[in-house]
Image: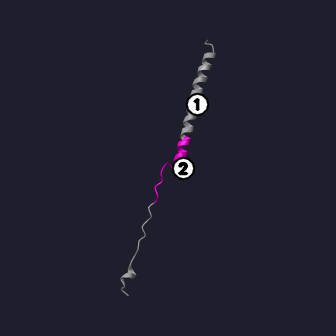
């Protein structure tokens, strides 16, 4: 009954995960959304700057 093979415990070793190269989908989506937001903000600021210049130039001063 005291057979050493009977009490042997084996612990499975985790298989190493393959390292992914490049950016994940979430990172790419975040970059795209950030770039689009930056372009929209810049476009709005340019439009406001041009619109204010034109509106102040066309109104006569009292």
Q: In the rendering, which numbered label is found on residue 25? A: 2
Q: Residue at x 41, y 74 (%)?
A: 10
Q: Is residue 12 above or below residue 8?
A: above
Q: Position of residue 59 (x, y in %)?
A: 63, 16
Label pair 2/1, CB-CB below 8 angstroms = no
Q: Residue at x 55, y 45 (%)?
A: 29
Quadrant in which the N terminus appears: bottom left
Decide whether residue 27 is among the magenta residues: yes
2 or 1: tag closer to the N-terminus: 2
Kindly report the distance in space between the C-alpha atoms of the residues bearing marks 2 and 1.
27 Å
The crowding category of the residue bearing disc 2, from other C-alpha atoms within 10 Å (few below 14, some 14 to 19, many at least 20), is few
Q: Secondary structure at mark 1?
A: helix
Q: Position of residue 18 (x, y in %)?
A: 46, 58
Residue 34 shown left or right of residue 13 in the figure:
right
- Determine which residue is flagged by label 1: 43
Which segment is the magenta one?
17-33
């Amino acid at each position: 009954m005291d057979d050493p093979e009977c009490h042997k415990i084996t612990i499975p070793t985790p298989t190493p995960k393959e390292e992914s190269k490049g950016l994940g989908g979430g990172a790419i989506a975040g970059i795209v959304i950030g770039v689009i937001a930056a372009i929209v903000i810049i476009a709005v600021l340019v439009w406001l700057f041009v619109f204010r210049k034109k509106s102040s130039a066309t109104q006569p001063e009292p």
